[in-house]
Image (cartoon, helix red, strand yellow):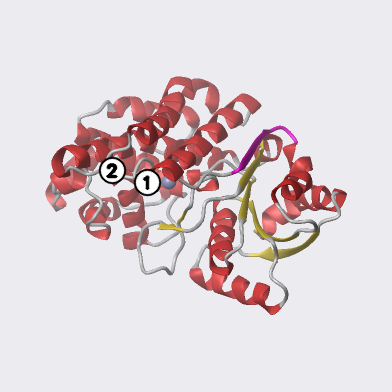
Amino acid sequence: MELPRKILIGESVISELGSIIRSLGTDSPTVAIISGKKVKARAGKDCAQALKKESLAFSWHIGDNASMETVGKLQEKLEEKDLPDFVLGFGGGRSVDIAKMTAFKIDKPFLSVPTSASHDGISSPFVSIRGTDKPHSVKANTPIGVLADTLLMSNAPPRLLAGGCGDLVGKITAVKDWELAKEDRGEYFGSYAANLAYMSARIILAESKRLGKANQFGIRTIVEALISAGVAACIAGSSRPCSGSEHLFSHAIEYVAGPDFGLHGERVGIGTIMMAKLHGLDWEKIKETLVDVGAPTTAKQIGLSDEHVVKALVTAQSLRPDRYTVLSKIKLDIKSARELAKAVKVI
Ligand SMILES: [Zn+2]
């Protein structure tokens, strides 16, 4: 198991970034910060100040696009000079993903400093990025540290937080799919990792009424759950506990419709409603939870056509044939996919 060594969550913990890096590294560690333009403008000062306080040398790099092309350019830029001791991803899910992959490519430790709680990649070794040879997430290295400043996160657009909840409710069907793979295929099933991931979804279901607003309780609960889910993937050594048929649906949407339809967690949330129905679970409760936290529950809300949804449902399992899920067991065709999406009012 490869787990993060330090995890710090709380209001204004960004001010401790420099000392965290010192505690993890060599005498005078150097840091390459990878971030998006908007986040740098909004919160870059806090990040820079924390590093200056500890007299750490750092450089800023902008990576707005979660693609291997961006990673390649950043890698080239970093390799022009002495390599940094740490690569720090500062920003939303995209910046964290770009930085994690860049760190992996140059073989340096990665520090995750998310400014929004939008998906579980903030603490896991997995990366969703375009331009790999796989249509789903791929494995890089586990972050050596995770620093989640809940005050910084409270200034992020509320839609991102709702997306984080969508990614979390997805663990319900991901764990069910894993159980199914154990029963039908004799696949290894890690109870501890499965329970940890499942618990991070349960808390969202239980507390959904209080989570909707960007208050400190809501942010802290969601970010803790996302970090726990990411750690569950670290423990399992695979994305199994966190990613099942609902994630295959999300990847399929990107595949059939392109990358501009909803956030990762929004697509996963919608996928979870449908996969829960296929599993015979209480999909209405999942839908209610998503409504409570302000996440979308219909295709229309994220700009998708009915045809996109149907096509994605039919295609999803073929994107990852080796990952046995409910979609391997119940093979959907155009007709049954449409019926499913209609039955739960996604279309
Ligand atoms: Zn996810």
Q: Residue at x 43, y 57 (%)?
A: 139
Q: Looking at the image, which is closer to me, 294 or 89?
A: 89
Q: Residues within 10 Å of mark 1 (few under 14, many from 20)?
A: few
Q: Could you tell which of marks 2 and 1 lies nearer the N-terminus?
A: 1
The residue range painted magenta reads 5-12
Q: Position of residue 184 (x, y in %)?
A: 14, 41
- What x and y, as percent, mark residue 190? 32, 37
What distance separates the C-alpha of mark 2 from that of mark 1? 7 Å
Q: Which residue is mark 1?
A: 300
Q: Position of residue 114 (x, y in %)?
A: 62, 46
In the rendered image, the quadrant that contains the C terminus is: top left
Tell me which secondary structure the magenta stretch mostly adopts: strand
Viewer-proximal residue among 320 and 161: 320
Asked whether, in this view, residue 173 is left or right of residue 47, the answer is left
Q: Is residue 90 magenta?
A: no
The image quarter containing residue 271 is top left
